[in-house]
Amino acid sequence: MNEAIDGRIGHVGGIESLTLDGRRYFFGFDYKSDLVVSPLIDDPDAMAAFASEHMRQNTGKHDEAYWAELVDWAVEYSDLVEEDADRDFTTEDLRLEGHLLYLLASATEWDCSFAAEPQAQEAFGRLGFDEGDIEHCVEHCLQVIRRDGWDTRPDEWAVARFFVTSAIDRLPGNWRLLYATFVDPGRNVAG
């Protein structure tokens, strides 16, 4: 159930958490690489066991008791966001922006293969964003779409649609459950 993500075993990292519809999920995060390194795990003991087996700290490998303290810490604190509200989501009012967009990109290893699509590549170029600045470009596109409507902003719509569709298709482990709302064909990526 809490299978390690291929290629992400042994990373040095810490524990983060978020809530979705009142349910807390923990996950491992490699801060140096900006990379999600575990599935979403809703049981604190299971998260500590997972981290003990698959993660490291700068000081090396540690036991479950050590990781349990970091899991407890992650309930109240985060090294990724300053405000607790930035990691508390409901499916009813889920918006793909800010922290949620950052986690989507870090869970998919910041892959920008979506830009290989000719329509997305052309739109990306016309918008003038650097290919290395995907998170800010997509966040900008989503904000503009929400403000002006997708039909009046075709370049922004193309970039956001291709990025989100591509990223969601590549989500590792059970990360798709956090983004399931955006997979629903009756809902557009702008929220």
Image (tube, helix red, strand yellow):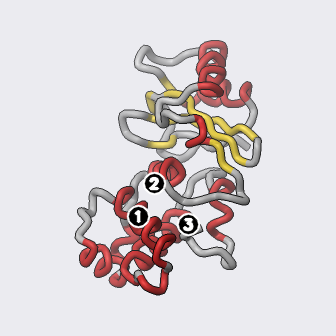
Left or right? Give the position of 39 relative to 81.
right
Q: CA distance from mark 3 to mark 1?
A: 17 Å
Q: Which label sits on residue 138?
A: 1
Left or right? Give the position of 167 relative to 113.
right
Q: What residue do we see at 63% from left, 24% from top?
A: 71
| Tag 1 and tag 2, C-beta contact below 8 Å | yes
- Foreground: disc 3 or disc 1: 1
Instruction: Check the picture and name the quadrant holding the N terminus.
Output: top right
The answer to which image quadrant residue 48 occupies is top right
Instruction: Check the picture and name the quadrant holding the C terminus.
Output: bottom right
Q: CA distance from mark 1 to mark 2?
A: 10 Å
Judge whether 51 appears above or below 8 on screen.
Answer: above
Judge whether 74 appears above or below 94 on screen.
Answer: above
Q: Mark 1 is on which residue type?
A: Val
Label 1: which secondary element: helix
Label 3: which secondary element: helix
Residue 32 point in image, percent of width and height: 36, 34
Q: Which label sits on residue 105?
A: 2
Q: How many marks?
A: 3
Residue 108 visible in the displayed image: no
Q: CA distance from mark 3 to mark 2?
A: 12 Å
Q: Mark 3 is on which residue type?
A: Asp
Q: Mark 2 is on which residue type?
A: Ala
* Sequence-first disc among 3 and 2: 2
State the residue in front, 138 or 61: 138
Q: What residue do we see at 45% from left, 32% from top?
A: 11
Q: Which label sits on residue 169?
A: 3
Residue 54 point in image, percent of width and height: 56, 31
